[in-house]
Image (spheres, helix red, strand yellow):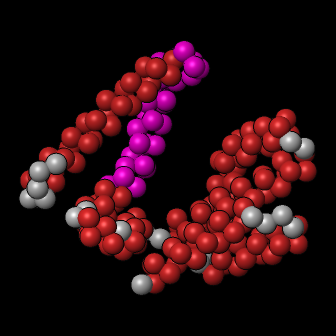
Amino acid sequence: MKNIILFLIFMIYATFIFFINDAVLLVAVLLINILAMLLFKVKITAVIENIVKILPFILLTVVINCILSHYEYAILVAIKLMLVCNITFIYSKTTTVREIAFTIKCFCMPLKLIKVNPDDIELLVCISLSMLPILKREYLQLKDACVAKGMDLNVNNMKPIFTKLMISVMKRVNEIEESMIEKGYGEI
């Protein structure tokens, strides 16, 4: 029950941020984010690293909004994105993949009425979220291999990189499928 309440609070809070247009409320949200970082003992250096990672996306959003609208709106959107990404990072650092999958399973319980098994959804969410770090590691290994071979990482060379990445992903999916069948989960 705690996970469900925490998830609902997170979703409502993250959604609420996008409806704020007042600078004072945004400062209050920033203070709430800082309080959440302290409360859940999330390292500030990790939060700063995360912000640096998402900064290109935020800057691209600012540029597009400056072109389509005015700079004040673009800055407001950038601040909102940073705050939402920050609270999402805090949530992801304080919640395990298993807890997220269980929470989604609880939300999918009404689907039993139309004969959808929430346990299957939980398993799919768990596998999907667990695959993300594997995909990232595979991509970084492929990128490092290309750099070691002296290949430039540009748009022209992305096709072979993503082809090898997809082959690797399919091998991983095959391994997971075989493992699930061997453990008697059923037909996939």
Q: Outermost residue, front direction?
A: 114
Q: Nearer the viewer, residue 144 or 68?
A: 68
Q: Nearer the viewer, residue 105 or 31?
A: 105
Residue 64 drawn at (x, y percent): 78, 37
Q: Residue visible at 74% across and 39% down?
A: 60
Q: Outermost residue, bottom direction?
A: 1
Residue 70 drawn at (x, y percent): 90, 44
Inspect this view and state whether residue 130 appears.
no
Q: Is residue 131 magenta?
A: yes
Q: Which residues lie in the magenta part?
A: 127-156
Residue 17 drawn at (x, y percent): 72, 66
Q: Residue visible at 83% across and 37% down?
A: 68
| Location of residue 111 (image quadrant) | bottom left
| Location of residue 48 (image quadrant) | bottom right
Above or below: residue 173 compared with residue 182: above
**Is 187 on the left-hand or right-hand side of 118?**
left
Inspect this view and state whether residue 28 appears.
yes
